[in-house]
Image: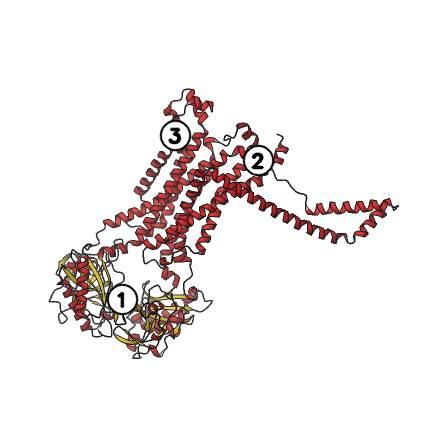
Amino acid sequence: MPERERKHLRGPVWRESVTDEVSAELSFHVEMRARELAARGLDLEEARRAALAQFGDISDVRAECETIASQRDRDMRRATYRSEFLQDTRYAVRQIRGAPWFSLLVIGTLGLGIASATTIFSAVHAVVLRPHGFANADRVHFISETWKESAGDVSPGTFIDLDEQATQFETIAAIDWSTFVLAAEGVPDQVVGAAVTPDYFQVFGVHPVLGRGFTTEDAQPGAPRVVILSHAIFREQFGGDRSVLGTDIRVDGDPARVVGVLPAGFDPLLMGEALWVPLALTPEQIAARGSHWLDVVGLARAGVPHATVQSELDRLAGLMREQHPADHEDRGIVAQPIREVLLGDYDRRLFLLLGAVSVVLLIACANVANLLLARGAAREKEIAVRAALGAGHGRILRQLLTENLVLSLATVALSIGIALVGARLIVTFAPADIPRIAETRIDPVVLAFAVIVGALSSLVFGLAPALRAVHTDLQGTLRSGGRDTQGGTRDWLRNSLVIGEVALSVLLLVGAGLLIRTSVEAARVDPGFRMDGIVSARVTLPEQTYRDPERVQAAFQRIAEAAATRPGVTHGAATSLPPLGAGGNEMFLNVEGRPATLDAAVVGRMRIVSNGYLEALGIPLLRGRGFDSRDVRAADRVTIISADLARRLWPGQDPLGRRFACCEENATSPAWKTVIGVAAAVRSQSPTIEPYPEFYLPLAQAPDGSWNWIQRSMSIVATGAQTDALVAAIRDAVHSVDGSVPVYGIGTVRDALRNATAAARFNMLLLSILGALGLVLAATGIYGVVSYFVNLRRKEIGVRMALGASTRSVLALTTRQAMGPVVIGLVLGALAALAATRLLAASLFGVTPTDPLTFGITLAGLLLVALGAILLPARRASRVDPTEALQA
C-alpha cells in the first residue's frame, strides 16, 4: 500500500474550516445571483456589484453564517462523540465479557493497589489533612520554657509575664491537667479534666452552647467553685438535662456549680477532657519561678508569622533573665504551632506509609500495563483491520482508552469496597495514641481520591499499551496473521516494566525487613524488670478531701499494705510512676560538696515508691539495701538510685553513703538524701528507649510538695498468678481505705509493653503486608511476561529443538533471557533502598538503615521468588513438541 494512502487510512479525516466553508458558500450565492442579473442584460462586473449590494454588509452576513456553522459543527461533534462513546462503552463491556479471566485479573490487581492507597490515605486525611475542630488552628501556638534547649512546662510567674507583655498574641491561657472524681447521681467516676485560666476557650474560638464561660472573678483564689462540662459528659452523666445548668455537682468530693456546657467534639488538645475548672494562681505560686507545671497556649494575632512570634518570645526571655537571673539562667521560651505539637512525628510516619503504598500501586499498575500490552498484541489483527477500513488513530485510541475506563470504574468500585474494610481495620489495630485515628473513614474526600487515582492509573498505564496498539505495522500484521511483530524477548517496554516492578519490590521488602528486625531486636531487650504476673491500677485522691500531705501519704501507705496482704497477691506496692508509664517528674539534683547551680546539677527522674516495690517488679538491687520500716518520715532522708544515675553523679566512685538534694528544696538548708542502695537500670518508657537516670524516694519520706507535682496520684502494683484475683485485690485494698475513690487505668505490665511498642508494631505490620503484596504482584508480573514470551516463541523454540537443541539448553536460554531484567531490577532497587531507608532511621532499633543482613536476605529471597516465577513457564517452553510448534 502506498505510504500516502496508508497515512490517509490511519490518520484523521480533516474537515474544511468554518471560514473556508462560509466563504465558499457566500461566493457561490453571489456568483449565482450575478449570473441571473447578467442574463437580464447587465454587464458581468455590474451584475456582481449589484449582487453584492443585494446581500447588504457582506462581513455581517459572513460573521453570522460562521457563528451558525460553528454551532452546528459543535453540536455535530458532541452528538458524534456521545454516539461513539456509547458505542465504545458497549463494545468495551462485550470485550470484558469475552475475556472474563483477563478482566478479573486486571480489576483484581489494580483494585488491590488502589484499595491499599485509599485505605492509608483515609488515615492520613483523618490524622494530618483534615482541619482541626476549632477556629484559627493555624494561629494557635503551644508555648514552652526551655532549659539548655530542652523544652518543658512553664512557671506561673513566666505565664503572668507573657500574658501581660506579649504583644503578638491576642490572648494567652494556662492549663493544669488533672484527673477529677466526678459524682453524678452518687456514682463516683474518674475523669480527665483541666484547670484553665479564663481566656482558655477564647484561644480556640469556642463558646459554651449552654451557660457561660469563666470570668476573671471565677479564677480568684477562694472564689466559689464552678465547673464547665464537656458535651459528652453532659449527655452521658446527666442525660442532656438542661436543668443541670446552675446546679451543684460533686467534683473531688466538693460541690461545684455548673455554669456552662461546651459544644460536642471540643477536644482541641486531644486529651479527652470531661470538665474544666478555673485555674486560680496564688501569689505564692506566681512568685515561685523555679516551679514549672503549666502548659500554655496562645492565639497569635491575625497575619503575624511564626518567626515574629518567636522573635518576641526571645526578647521577653532575655528580659526575664535580666530581671530574675537566679531562676532564668540558661532558660528560653519557644512557641510551636499547635499542629506540630499534636501530631508529633505521626505525620512523617503516615506519609512514609503513604509512600510505601504508592509503591505497591505502581507495581500493580506496571502489572496491568504488561497485561494490557499482551492483550494489545493479541488484538493486533483486529486493530489492523479497523485501521485498514478507515479508522483513524484518534478513533482507535479512544476505543482502547474507553475500555480502560470501563475497567477502571469496576476497579474503583472494588477498591472502595476493600478500603471500607481496611479503614475499619486501621481503627481497630492502630495505636490509640495516634491523634484522631478513630476518625478514619471513607468520606467524600477519600472517595474522590480513589476515583482520581483510578482514573489516572487507567489513563497513564493504559496509554502506552494503547499507543503501541494504535501504531501497529498495518502491512506486517495483516501478512503475519496477527502474530506479534513487536520485538519478542527484547521488547524494551515489557522488560522495563519488569525492571520497575522488581526494583520497587526491593524497596518495599527492605523497609519491611528493617522494621521486622527492629521488632526482633526490641523483643530481645531485657527491660530490667519482670513482665508477667503484674497488674497495675491508678488511684487519685481528691484534693478537697486530702489536702494534708501526711494524710495523703498515710492513705497510700495503707493501700499498699492492704494490697500486699490480700489472698493471691505475692507482692503489693505503690509507685508514683508505673512501669512503662509515660511522663514522670524530672528533678535537678545537686550533689553535696558541689556548687548548687543549674550548671552543676544532674537531671534525674523521681519515683516515690512504697516498701517492696523493687521486689514486686523484680528490679535487682546491685548494692546496698532496699527501703524498710526504718525509713519513716521522722528519720534521715534516704534514696535508692539507678546504676546509670550513680555513674552520672559519682563516676568511678562508690555512691553508698553519699548525698544529694533536689533543686526545688531550700538551697541554704537542703534536705540531703543519703544513697542507701543502687538498683539496676530499667527501660521504664519502652524497650527501645535507653534507661533514664532515676532515683527512688520512700513513700513515707515523700516531700510535701511532691503530692501536688504528682496530683496525689499513684499506681498500685500487685504480683501473683491470676490476673483477675490481682485486679480484685487492688480494688478491695483501695476501697478498704476509702470507698469513694475510684480505681482506673487497670492493666497488666505486659499490656503496657504492648501499648508502648504498638506504633512500631503497627508500622511493621502495615509495611510487611505491603511488601508481601508487592512481592506477589511482582512475581505474577514476571510470570505473566515470561509466559507471554514463551507462547510468542513457540515456533522458534520448536525450530531450535527440531535442529537438535536439548531440553536443558532451551530451559537455560529461556531462564537466562528472563533473568536479565530481574537482575537489573534487583540492582536498581538495592541502590534506591540504600537512599530511601534512611527515612526509617528514627523508627529503627538495633539495626542500621543499611543493614547488610536485611539487604542480603531481601535480595536473595526476591531472586528465588523471581526464579520460581520464571521456571514454571520456562519448563513449559522446554517441553514444546517441535512437530506441533512447526505445524502451528
Nearer to the camera, 459 or 298: 459
> Where residue 490 is drawn, which disc sits there?
none
Q: Give the residue at mark 1.
A: 598
Q: Give the residue at mark 2.
A: 386
Mark found first going from the N terminus, 2 or 3? 2
Residue 383 seen anywhere in this rendered image of the structure: yes
Distance from the alpha carbon under mark 2 to that under mark 1: 86 Å
Mark found first going from the N terminus, 2 or 1? 2
Residue 654 seen anywhere in this rendered image of the structure: no
Residue displayed at 18% across by 62% down: 728
Dividing the picture into quadrants, the one containing residue 643 is bottom left
Query: In which quadrant is the N terminus drawn?
Result: top right
Secondary structure state at the residue bearing disc 2: helix
Dividing the picture into quadrants, the one containing residue 471 is top right
Please state the horizontal and vertical placement of residue 71, each as a whole percent of the image. 66, 51
Nearer to the camera, 622 or 745: 745
Q: Looking at the image, is mark 2 or mark 3 nearer the viewer?
A: 2
Please state the horizontal and vertical placement of residue 267, each as a whole percent of the image. 36, 65
Type of the residue with mark 1: Leu
Residue, far right: 41
Secondary structure state at the residue bearing disc 1: loop
Residue displayed at 74% across by 45% down: 24
Nearer to the camera, 50 or 317: 50
Q: Is residue 344 above or below residue 487?
A: below
Q: Circles 2 and 1: CB distance less than 8 Å?
A: no
Dividing the picture into quadrants, the one containing residue 816 is top left
Crowding at label 1, few (<14), some or many (≥20) Cα neighbours within 10 Å?
Answer: some
Q: Give the residue at mark 3.
A: 874
Q: Is residue 426 above or below residue 85?
A: below
